[in-house]
Amino acid sequence: MIAPVVSVAAEAAPPQLGLPTIRFATPADDRFVEDLQAIAFGPGRFARTAYRVRERFPIDPTLSLIAEVNGQPCGSVWMTPISVGGIDGYMLGPLATHPDFRKRGAGKLLAREVSRIALERGEGSFVLLVGDRDYYCPLGWVPTIPGAVVWPGPVDPTRVLCYSQVPTMAARLAGPIKAFGAKKRS
Ligand SMILES: CC(C)(COP(=O)(O)OP(=O)(O)OC[C@H]1O[C@@H](n2cnc3c(N)ncnc32)[C@H](O)[C@@H]1OP(=O)(O)O)[C@@H](O)C(=O)NCCC(=O)NCCS
């Protein structure tokens, strides 16, 4: 099955010019994504706190996107449904672009599109991540209150960023990361 293209880089452009396009991942992409994450994050990826979140709460495979250039997979992003303080949302990551295809807009396109698609479902209302402000804040992520979100391991609290259509969301997120829908079950 050929997955449909979801989006093309904003400044964009016919893919024949080498700009990235985005499509949903299929099981046939699993090997590419595994290899890409190994290249991008190295063996230390298994020790990352975000990895611990994904061990507890599975990623949503229907929110797994692939970036391609000229039909060649070059980037990937995953989303993990979570809740914080009774509010449902998503944790974004890992986000990675193959070193041969960086600085073409694939990473930002993946982050933007997976967040748009997830929030448009209307089930979760934020996208949380641990990342560099210089990269994510121009895309709309804002800092959370340092230390307010409780992770299952060490994180730099100044790197915990939130994207939401609700302007006050970043200030409201507080408490441990729990399963998506935890409020309704407790
Ligand atoms: C971060 C990453 C996904 C960016 O992928 P990409 O496809 O090159 O991203 P884009 O093309 O959309 O953006 C590139 C721009 O972001 C900048 N950039 C890349 N990483 C950055 C960072 N950590 N902080 C600030 N800016 C960054 C680049 O310098 C470039 O700037 P320019 O457009 O002015 O030249 C990629 O470098 C990667 O896979 N890195 C290793 C894994 C990683 O760190 N993932 C993010 C975890 S939060």
Image (spheres, rainbow, N blue to C red):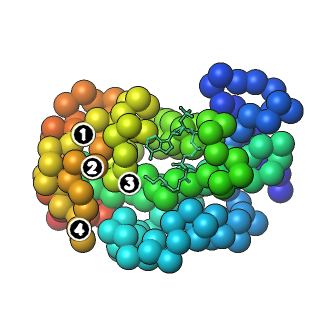
Q: Which residue is mark 3?
A: 91
Q: Is residue 9 something that shows in the picture?
A: yes
At a point 50% along the width and 77% down the height, the residue shown is 43
Q: Vertically, is 174 above or below 185?
A: above
Closer to the observer: label 3 or label 1? 1
**C-alpha span from label 4 to label 1:** 17 Å
Q: Quadrant location of the C terminus?
A: bottom left
The amino acid at mark 2 is Val
The amino acid at mark 3 is Met
Q: Vertically, is 59 above or below 17?
A: below
At a point 71% along the width and 52% down the height, the residue shown is 100
Q: In the figure, is residue 76 to the left or right of 178? A: right
At a point 74% along the width and 34% down the height, the residue shown is 19
User: Could you tell which of marks 3 and 1 lies nearer the N-terminus?
Assistant: 3
Q: Position of residue 42 (x, y in %)?
A: 53, 72
Q: Which residue is mark 4?
A: 154
Q: Position of residue 83 (x, y in %)?
A: 27, 55
